[in-house]
Image: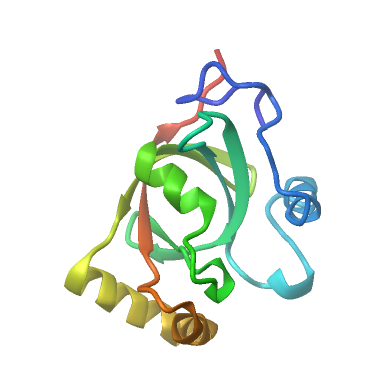
Amino acid sequence: MPDTLSPFPAFSPDPYVHPVNQPIVTEFRANHGSVGGPFTGADLLLLTTLGARSGRPATSPLTYFRDGERLLVVASAGGSPRHPSWYHNLCSHPEAVIELGDHTLTVHAAVTEGAERDALFEKITVLAPGYLDYQATAGRSIPVVALTPTGPATTP
């Protein structure tokens, strides 16, 4: 990962990674985007957002689904009744950086709504039915977020 990613010119080279996710992030970067264990064969990206309250960068590994040029991520938090922090971060700061394999891109995030969200969630659950279990236990509508690439991330 470059030392400093746009659109975050002022952050340290080490965004926060939750300790549970650190081995996944390390393996992802060491293996050009491939991760084993429960993620074997899954399409995985690393999402770096700016904290909604702190303004500090944080990186989260997420599975994604393609929708044309957009990448869709599901804010399931494993079926938790609360949205994941990366979702709140994107709602406050929709510009983010993703890593796909060895490629780093800037993206604009948009939370899908209504019929679009429902149709996308249905398509996703055909590919990954576990999200239906998460939806059943979450007690909330699980958001589907569309990430649209806006360009390559750059280093100053």
Observer-nearest residue: 97 or 150? 97
Residue 94, visible in the rendered structure: no
Check the picture and name the quadrant holding the C terminus: top right
State the colouring used for the structure image: rainbow
From this view, report whether residue 104 is shown above or below residue 5: below
Q: Residue at x 55, y 26 (%)?
A: 5
In this rendering, position of residue 109 left or right of residue 47:
left
**Picture quarter containing residue 114?**
bottom left
- Residue 2 placed where, x, y %? 65, 26
Observer-nearest residue: 25 or 55? 55
Check the picture and name the quadrant holding the N terminus: top right
- Residue 55 placed where, x, y %? 51, 29
Residue 138, visible in the rendered structure: yes
Q: Residue at x 59, y 21 (%)?
A: 11
Q: Residue at x 68, y 37 (%)?
A: 16
In this rendering, position of residue 125 left or right of residue 122:
right
Observer-nearest residue: 26 or 32? 26
From this view, report whether residue 115 is shown above or below residue 51: below
Q: Residue at x 58, y 72 (%)?
A: 78
- Residue 33 placed where, x, y %? 68, 53
Q: Which residue is most to the left?
A: 115
From this view, report whether residue 3 is shown above or below residue 40: above
- Residue 58 placed where, x, y %? 60, 39
In this rendering, position of residue 148 left or right of residue 138:
left
From this view, report whether residue 20 is shown above or below residue 88: below
Count how many numbered circles sit on residues in the image.
Answer: 0
